[in-house]
Amino acid sequence: MAHVAWTSAEAGSLAFHILGAEQEQARADVVAARHRVEDAMGVPRGSVFYLEQVHSADVVTAGPGWEEGCAPIADASVSPDGHTPLAVMVADCLPVVFVDGLTGATAVAHAGRRGLLDGVLENTVDALLALRPEGSAGAFGLKAWIGPGISGESYEVPQAVQDEAVARIPELEATTSWGTPALALTSGAQAVLRARGVAVERIALDTFTDERVFSHRRAPGRGRFAGLVWTTPADVDQDHVAGDPRG
């Protein structure tokens, strides 16, 4: 059984790359937060696969969990059999989580402005479809969840940046609540995925205005929350992770 969830600020920051001045204690806090999340997921400690995210469109195949090796530099990962728990960290960019009902494969992607424009979602879908039996048609059975991210009402950008983005993905066009050019990342991501035949669900939560999750624009350097996907035996009932902002 596949499970999808989003952590929150209450669960703690899951990122090592923004540790702050008190490095040793901050690192210990991240380790503790990751362990708490894994305990809530019901997976072994250290088994979740994280990435070193750099706003690329690169996709990698999941390997050992975070306590067994370095996180690869990429912005999406795929577990071909769905057995490796996956995490994608964000704080305004979109955490996008995938489950393929045909193969059991799972994936996560970090989709901010640059990643969306460079094709991180298309590349992730391609990687999942490549795992299907030869001759499989379309993306029927492939589902994506777009997690909490900054909304078009909050994500102000210069006009030139909006023009570049809208030329690539028209659905990104938005206006802030105060009347300036903006980008609607969730609408853009949904359009990209639906154009590929992927079924999509959206989590309507604006990271900039909702303090249950971290936001780089609202509070730079405070932390990163995560989108998660993992599988458990069918007789295990797990619907959320502690601190899940959906509830």
Image: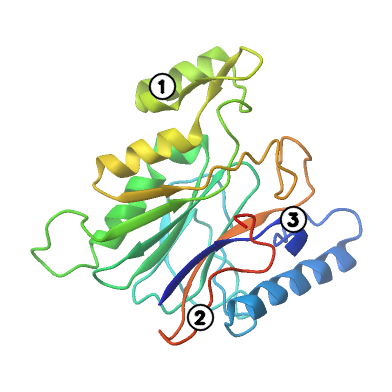
| Residue 153, percent from left and from top | 60, 25
First in sequence: mark 1 vs mark 3: 3
- Between 152 and 156, the one lying in front of the other is 152
Residue highlighted by disc 1: 166
SS state under label 2: loop
First in sequence: mark 2 vs mark 1: 1
Residue highlighted by disc 2: 237
| Residue 9, percent from left and from top | 74, 55
The mark lying in front, picked from 1 and 3, is: 3
The amino acid sitting under disc 2 is Asp
Residue highlighted by disc 3: 9
Q: Residue at x 40, y 77 (%)?
A: 1
SS state under label 1: helix
Q: Is residue 18 visible?
A: yes
Q: Residue at x 54, y 13 (%)?
A: 159
| Residue 204, percent from left and from top | 54, 42
The amino acid sitting under disc 3 is Ala
